[in-house]
Image (spheres, rainbow, N blue to C red):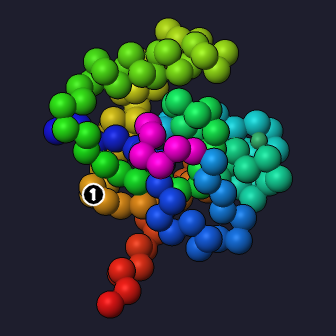
Amino acid sequence: MMKLLVATSKTQGARENDFNHCVEGELIWIAPCCDEGDTSPDSACGCGRSFCGLNSHEGTTTALVAELPGFTYSDYAEAMRSSLAAQGWPPEAADEVARGLVAFTTGWEVGTVLERRCDWFAERLVPAPPG
Ligand SMILES: [Zn+2]
């Protein structure tokens, strides 16, 4: 089964400048940063520390590695294509972006929460549920 990145509220607040405007569980991608975001992941715009929701077009600083049963690569590429088009990115880049994300996500365990520091990604430790 293919691993994907989805928006999660898990570990939100672990960093003071965390935010999550995505819909929980929606597909996300790693969008290019603006100049400011490229310089610092803690910039005011937040693009250097965030992932972007394919449906909401909003950002979140926390991403979950997940498997979606029955969801195929072509579903993924199509979701990427329509999202890129809706956001004014070239939709013909969808296949390359989707392949890149699949390759990226393959290296992480399902259930891992990731954060972004520009081009660098790290696992966040998920606290055990109370009790
Ligand atoms: Zn930015």
Quarter of the image for residue 116 reads bottom right
- Report which residue position mark 1 lands on: 109
111 or 105: nearer the eye? 111
Q: In x, y percent, where is residue 22?
A: 57, 45
Residue at x 53%, y 11% (from the top left corner): 91
Local crowd size for mark 1, using a 10 Å CA cut-off: few (<14), some (14–19), many (≥20):
few
10 or 92: nearer the eye? 10
* First to last magenta residue range: 22-27
Question: What residue type is disc 1 on?
Answer: Glu
Residue 56 visible in image: yes
In what quadrant of the picture does the C terminus appear?
bottom left
Q: Where 90 falls versus 96 (above or below)?
A: above
For ligand 1, the image quadrant comes to top right
Q: Secondary structure at mark 1?
A: loop
Residue at x 69%, y 38% (from the top left corner): 33
Residue at x 42%, y 46% (from the top left corner): 25
Residue 106 visible in image: no
